Image (cartoon, rainbow, N blue to C red):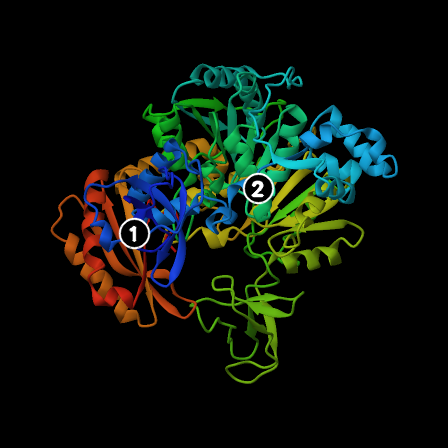
Amino acid sequence: MTTVRVALPVPLRQLFDYKIEPNHNAQIGCRVLVPFGSRKLVGIVWQLAPEDSFTASRLKTILQVLDSQPVLPPQLCQLLSFAADYYHYPLGEVLISALPALLREGRELTSFQPKAWQLTEAGRQLDAATLKRAPKQLALWQALAQHRLSESLMLQQFGRPAAKQLLDKGLAEEVCVPATPFTPPEATATGLKLTADQAMAVAAVNQACGRFERLLLEGVTGSGKTEVYLQSIAGLLNAGKQVLLIVPEIGLTPQTLARFQARFDVPVLCWHSALSDGERLHCWLQASSGAAAIVIGTRSALFLPFYQLGLVIIDEEHDQSLKQQDGFRYHARDLAIKRCAIQHCPILLGSATPSLESLHNALSKKFIHLPLPDRAAGQALPSFTLVDLKQQVLQFGLAGQTLTQIRAELAKGLQVMLFLNRRGFAPALSCQECGWLTECHRCSAFTTYHKQSRQLVCHHCGASKAIPRQCGGCGSTQLKPLGQGTEQLEESLQQLFPDTAITRLDRDSTRRKGALNEALSDIHQHGARLIVGTQMLAKGHHFPNVSLVVIVDVDGALYSSDFRAPEQLGQLLTQVAGRAGRGSSGGKVLLQTHYPQHSLLQDIIQNGYAAFARTALQEREMTRLPPYQFLAMFSAEAHQSELCQSWLQQLATIAADNTALQILGPIPAPLERRAGKYRWQLQLYSPNRPALHQMLDIMLAQLTLWPHSRKVKWQLDVDPTDLS
């Protein structure tokens, strides 16, 4: 027997050695089924015959080698190994997370390979007269005599009973058909005429093909970034190369998929969490074999095993949803850059509002900067108007000036979008007599009133309860909604505009499968209407009939303890405003606020996001915040606040003498209590990335030995984007 080292999906930062039978052909990257305590686990072979292994007599034997070929090819293994080291996460859990759910369960890959039907030797020698009394079997036999049929086509044309009868008679058989790389298209649909800036961007991408290059496409909303993607891809497809396009939201995937399928006569597949396990495995197999030419997916599509990857595109590269916020906390943009470096292909990052990290890299010449300063069709950028809410009489949270503008646009047969980044009916219920508010008993936050479902829901921990009849403080029955959410705004607009269709887009209204596509289709196909929604509306949607965007309430985002809050607000305002004026009519944006003179609002409105971002970078440099320093954050949760604080203080003591680090904390998290547990943070800053990671290794090695580490739920987040 020989020995192999296996990575297992367990929360331990170590690998495990097993014996293996000599007749088992295990390769690095193959799945194996192994005994682990009282359980059986699926692991990944990581090393063959390690020299520092235990003696074979002390090792358990691998139960089964599940793959004849690696499910994780060498280049993908290299990426995942880097990710486990960089984010300080157990290698076994990182490797397994890169596989579709059905493969994690240990299912054999051959059972999911494409199937086809063909005649056996007996079937080829059969006399047709033998089947003259079975016309369906005869028709199927005649078709198979001409050529092999795919399983789907055979079932569609002849049905399963006829196939089963031929199978039982030994006249036909089902065989696995390995997928083959896609055939380059003979011709591509003609694209739109490019502007000079677009043409330069496409040329830069084409010149970078075949080598590792990082390109940042900074284009204002409506500047035609998608057309740049499409025309950059065309040449790669002709060369037989595959393309990965990562989008931040599932909602953007279907419309992007339709546009790419209309342009290219090649297999275009999608990948996201709303697909079934079987659909995800099908996409995985097609990408692995090269049969999929283009894959459009969310962040986890990064780990697909492409046959011949030629280009990676990250659309809306600034978006926070590209960062995983629990478990293996990777950033898809950063790991995509590493993957392209490993596979020697270019990466194109696109956004109207680039992250300060990417912009810093572009300004320091690490990225090639490709600006698109004008809209593709020549339309002017939308104009901003600040609506001062002080000393105004509001109707359902809307100023008189706002309502006048809405009526004017609807009268022209155009559409109006109202943005409110708060779903539900109201942020809380309040007692009109004593001021009591409905709070979540598990979090330091208020519960949101959902009128449609008649529930109070905590948007932090998910807890829900029925609406109380009496105040929890004084017993009064005078409970009223406090504040406004999208559900209440929709109801209010129905009263103000009873003859106008209203579409609401938020997580509640699009929960049902297919609801988002139906709503988007309705918006595009019909005329005047009001569109109400959360930040789901801000990302990539093209509504040519929207001429006015109303940002109902922005004040809550102006004051935050998170140093990234100004950047995120600037991105959100610019992205939402960019939905206006994309058609033939001009665009206007009304921004309702109690603080019209706030410097952040004035900077974005007067100078635009590009100027604001460069000013924000200067502020980050002066305050020594990312991207000018590197950040890692330990967070701890426990039922006792003191336990979190003391545990993090013990961590801080380890790094106290390290002059390469700046330590902030332990400090309570902005949301101090969630789901019944208190939350504390320890933030580590350093201008030296290697020094920061060396200290993290030291801290992780020591904290596993502490008894209190089992009493707190702790996590390490490298390069965090959310400090809440």
State the image coordinates of residue 295 (x, y, percent, origin top left): 55, 33
At label 1, the amino acid type is Met
The residue that disc 1 covers is: 633
Observer able to see residue 537:
no
**Which is more toward the observer, 606 or 258?**
258
Q: Residue at position x 57%, y 76% from top?
A: 432
Look at the picture and state if 573 lies above or below 440.
Answer: above
Badge 1 marks a residue whose secondary structure is: strand
Q: How many marks?
A: 2
Q: What is the number of the mark on residue 112?
A: 2
Q: Residue at position x 52%, y 84% from top?
A: 474
Look at the picture and state if 39 lies above or below 434.
Answer: above
State the image coordinates of residue 242 (x, y, percent, origin top left): 52, 26
Badge 2 marks a residue whose secondary structure is: helix
State the image coordinates of residue 360 (x, y, percent, origin top left): 35, 31
- The outermost residue toward the right is 133
Q: Could you tell me which quadrant the C terminus lies in?
A: bottom left
**Which is more toward the observer, 600 or 278?**
278
Drawn side of residue 291 relative to residue 337, left or right: right
Q: Of label 1 and label 2, which has the lower sequence position?
A: 2
Look at the picture and state if 263 lies above or below 330.
Answer: above
Say which of marks 1 and 2 sits in front. Answer: 2
Drawn side of residue 668 relative to residue 409, left or right: left
Q: Could you tell me which quadrant the N terminus lies in?
A: top left
**Which is more toward the observer, 393 or 229?**
229
